[in-house]
């Protein structure tokens, strides 16, 4: 699983504790390398993008739902609020 460079520090600092993807990219208890550290997948949830934005925008590291929406649209320009996404929850491990 890859992350944008500007997400690395917020992940490492615990400010971003999940990531929303169009497809399932990991399972619970998977350990993934991210830059200079590892993350443990603690859960994966499938839900509509509109719900993911409302529920997870703070866990995604954003201050507002609009900021999170704008980020998603920049990554997935054709996605709609009714499309299903996968939220991968994680924690940094050493």
Image (cartoon, rainbow, N blue to C red):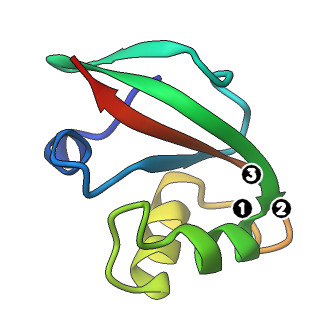
Label 3, label 2: how far apart the Cα atoms are: 7 Å
Numbered mark located on residue 85 in the image? 3
Residue drawn 56% across and 14% down?
30
- Pointers 1 and 3 in contact (CB under 8 A)? yes
Comparing marks 2 and 1, which lies closer to the viewer? 2
SS at circle 3: strand
Return the residue at label 2: 83
Label 1 vs 3, first from the N-terminus: 1
Comparing marks 1 and 3, which lies closer to the viewer? 3
Image position, residue 78 (x, y; %): 70, 60
Return the residue at label 1: 79
Is 26 on the left-hand or right-hand side of 75? right
Label 2, label 1: how far apart the Cα atoms are: 6 Å
Is 60 on the left-hand or right-hand side of 85? left
Q: Nearer the viewer, residue 23 or 12?
A: 12
Image position, residue 66 (x, y; %): 47, 86
Label 1, label 3: how far apart the Cα atoms are: 9 Å
- Pointers 3 and 2 in contact (CB under 8 A)? yes
Image position, residue 28 (x, y; %): 65, 25
Is 48 on the left-hand or right-hand side of 29? right
- Pointers 2 and 1 in contact (CB under 8 A)? yes
Determine crowd level at label 2: few under 14, some 14-19, many 20+ residues with C-alpha closer than 10 A.
Answer: few
Asked which quadrant contains residue 77, the reply is bottom right
Residue drawn 81% across and 59% down?
47
Image position, residue 3 (x, y; %): 35, 35
Determine crowd level at label 1: few under 14, some 14-19, many 20+ residues with C-alpha closer than 10 A.
Answer: some
SS at circle 1: loop
SS at circle 2: loop
Residue drawn 39% across and 79% down?
67
Q: Nearer the viewer, residue 80 or 89?
A: 89
């Amino acid at each position: 699983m890859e992350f944008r460079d500007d997400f690395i520090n917020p992940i490492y600092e615990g400010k971003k504790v999940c990531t929303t993807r169009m497809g399932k990219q990991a399972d619970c208890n998977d350990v993934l390398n991210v830059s200079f550290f590892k993350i443990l997948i603690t859960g994966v949830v499938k839900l509509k993008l509109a719900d993911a934005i409302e529920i997870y925008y703070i866990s995604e590291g954003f201050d507002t739902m609009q900021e999170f929406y704008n980020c998603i649209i920049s990554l997935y320009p054709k996605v709609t609020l009714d499309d299903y996404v996968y939220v991968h929850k994680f924690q940094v491990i050493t």
